[in-house]
């Protein structure tokens, strides 16, 4: 998984945050929460110091939109540094009731660029641990104040998509890393031996479904088994794969000379999504109206290798 451990200067960000908050008149309890955050992120104190008071303190700052947006940006950057630690997941679990740490990213399109960069960095760095990744991938829905249903994985995908298609290079970097991480995440699927049955038989025949790992899906597709087998994943995963694929295609169409690293992440992600989406990815390409043959090849050896895989998948699906 791609993370950004050297992007945040925690001491500098904390000093700036502390200076900005001094003007707001923090009470004694708030100052203690700020001190606890410093002890954890900068001094490496164990996660026992993180509690619900700190969650609520952070939530109040994130939701108080009349405050200087730099306060929220610096605060989330500190959380991005904390997210690199294996024990940070316990803090994420404390937020299950009010979901402050996901409600803020949900409003991504209305944030300042600095807030967006901090949010994308925070979410991306959570891929550093299995439990942090699981938090990003929670599919259970929950409701916002306007009664809209959302889920962690939908918000994660939204932030990744918006970041990649933005006009800010650092956001494109973080967004492409998030999409790559999502694509490379181990996914479970059911294998359906569709080659043994015609379309009329499938609804009534008793099939033996089997759990198939992400590695098996990719290996089967490379070995040519894809034509004989359909891999069925959760609908939410299909929807996410389609949303992220469209974001990638839009980025490739718009960007004349994408950085090699970002291009590699994009093409590698499309290889994985092509196995899951099959013909649907062809529809996405047609909808965006992008000519991948003229955009992708010739940038680097590893990009070309992934492009050959993707091209084979697309031809098989067609």
Image (tube, rainbow, N blue to C red):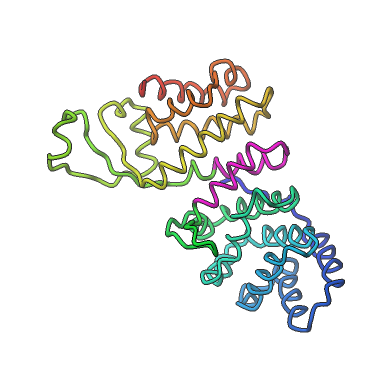
Q: Magenta segment: does it hold 169?
A: yes
Up the image or down, 256 lies above or below 169; here it is: above
Answer with the quarter of the image where residue 297 lies. top right
**Relative side of 316 to 191, left or right:** right
For the residue pair 2 and 95, the one nearer the viewer reads as: 95
Q: Residue at x 68, y 69 (%)?
A: 58
Answer with the quarter of the image where residue 274 lies. top left
Q: Magenta segment: does it hold 176?
A: yes
Q: Position of residue 179 (x, y in %)?
A: 55, 41
**Relative side of 8 to 91, left or right:** right
**Relative side of 315 to 32, left or right:** left
Q: Quadrant of the C terminus?
A: top left
Up the image or down, 107 lies above or below 58; here it is: above
Q: Position of residue 258 (x, y in %)?
A: 67, 27
For the residue pair 120 and 253, the one nearer the viewer reads as: 253
User: Taken as a whole, is the magenta stretch helix, strand or loop?
Assistant: helix
- What stretch of residues is rendered in magenta? 154-180
């Amino acid at each position: 998984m791609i993370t950004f451990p050297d992007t945040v200067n925690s001491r500098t960000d904390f000093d700036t945050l502390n200076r900005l908050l001094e003007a707001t008149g923090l009470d004694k309890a708030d100052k203690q929460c700020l001190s606890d955050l410093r002890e954890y992120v900068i001094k490496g104190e164990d996660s026992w110091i993180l509690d619900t008071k700190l969650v609520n303190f952070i939530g109040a700052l994130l939701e108080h939109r009349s405050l200087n947006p730099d306060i929220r940006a610096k605060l989330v950057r500190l959380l991005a540094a904390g997210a690199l630690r294996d024990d940070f997941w316990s803090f994420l679990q404390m937020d299950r009731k009010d979901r402050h740490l996901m409600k803020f990213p949900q409003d991504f399109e209305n944030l300042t660029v600095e807030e967006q960069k901090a949010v994308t960095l925070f979410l991306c760095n959570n891929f550093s641990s299995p439990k942090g990744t699981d938090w990003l991938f929670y599919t259970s829905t929950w409701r916002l104040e306007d009664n809209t249903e959302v889920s962690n994985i939908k918000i994660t995908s939204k932030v990744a998509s918006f970041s990649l298609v933005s006009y800010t290079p650092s956001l494109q970097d973080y967004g492409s890393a998030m999409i790559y991480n999502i694509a490379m995440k181990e996914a479970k699927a059911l294998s359906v031996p569709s080659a043994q049955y015609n379309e009329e038989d499938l609804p009534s025949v008793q099939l033996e479904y089997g759990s198939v790992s992400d590695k098996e899906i990719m290996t089967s597709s490379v070995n040519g088994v894809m034509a004989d087998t359909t891999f069925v994943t959760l609908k939410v995963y299909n929807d996410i794969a389609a949303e992220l694929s469209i974001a990638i295609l839009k980025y490739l169409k718009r960007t004349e000379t994408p950085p090699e690293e970002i291009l590699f992440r994009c093409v590698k992600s499309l290889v994985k999504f092509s196995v899951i989406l099959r013909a649907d990815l062809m529809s996405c390409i047609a909808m965006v109206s992008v000519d991948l043959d003229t955009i992708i090849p010739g940038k680097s050896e590893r990009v070309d290798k992934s492009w050959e895989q993707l091209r084979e998948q697309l031809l098989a699906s067609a």
